[in-house]
Image: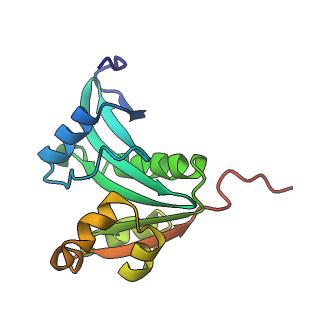
Amino acid sequence: MAFRKHHAGEIVVEQTRDLARVRSVLEAGGMITEGIEWPQACYILAFDGDDAIGSIGVECCIDAALVRSLFVNESYRRRGIGAELVAAARKAAHTRGARELYLLAYPELTTFFERQGFARTTNESLMQALPEAPEVSYYRARPEELAHELAFHLDISKDGVIER
């Protein structure tokens, strides 16, 4: 699959359909890859030149969406790339009709996601809002892994709305 050429040293964030590349980035980071082929999902990669250095996914279910698979290569962390990926995922979810955005994360990422506007919610609320999302199915089958994750929520219903 062809992809755009990027300039070395230039960080670019863009949506992709190259799931093999997404899988490669996620596997390199030890992330879950199960369900990335789901047709309603979209993936966004961060590039330094032509090297994929980060990823994020969005699984949309009618008016709610799940952010999944946020990963940035360790040598690129603390440069704002994660925040750029979250902003791109938020925009992708909103343009697909989502009004609510959810995610699951390790407790050590709480501060990062709170800075992005997310607030804690219950795992049960997340799972009820997104019953068909592949990552929800993954964790429903593995409650022992879900117990180590925290759920977060963000209302994006006003994103892109111009108020006069």
Which quadrant is the C terminus positioned in?
A: bottom right
Residue 25: quadrant of the picture: top left
Residue 10: quadrant of the picture: top left
The vertical placement of 75 against 86, above or below, is above
Q: Position of residue 83 (x, y in %)?
A: 41, 52
Which quadrant is the N terminus positioned in?
A: top left
The vertical placement of 64 against 119, above or below, is above
* Image side of residue 44 versus residue 23, left or right: right
Picture residue at 28% right of the left edge, 22% below the top = 8
Residue lying furthest right: 164
* Residue 106 seen in the figure: no
Q: Where is residue 104 in the image (x, y as percent from the top left)?
A: 33, 68
Picture residue at 44% right of the left edge, 47% below the top = 40
Picture residue at 46% right of the left edge, 62% below the top = 116
Q: Position of residue 139 (x, y in %)?
A: 25, 70
Picture residue at 68% right of the left edge, 50% below the top = 160
Pick the front one: 149 or 36: 36
Q: Where is residue 162 in the image (x, y as percent from the top left)?
A: 77, 52
- Number of labels in the image equals 0
Pick the front one: 135 or 31: 135
Q: What color scheme is it?
A: rainbow
* Residue 152 seen in the figure: yes
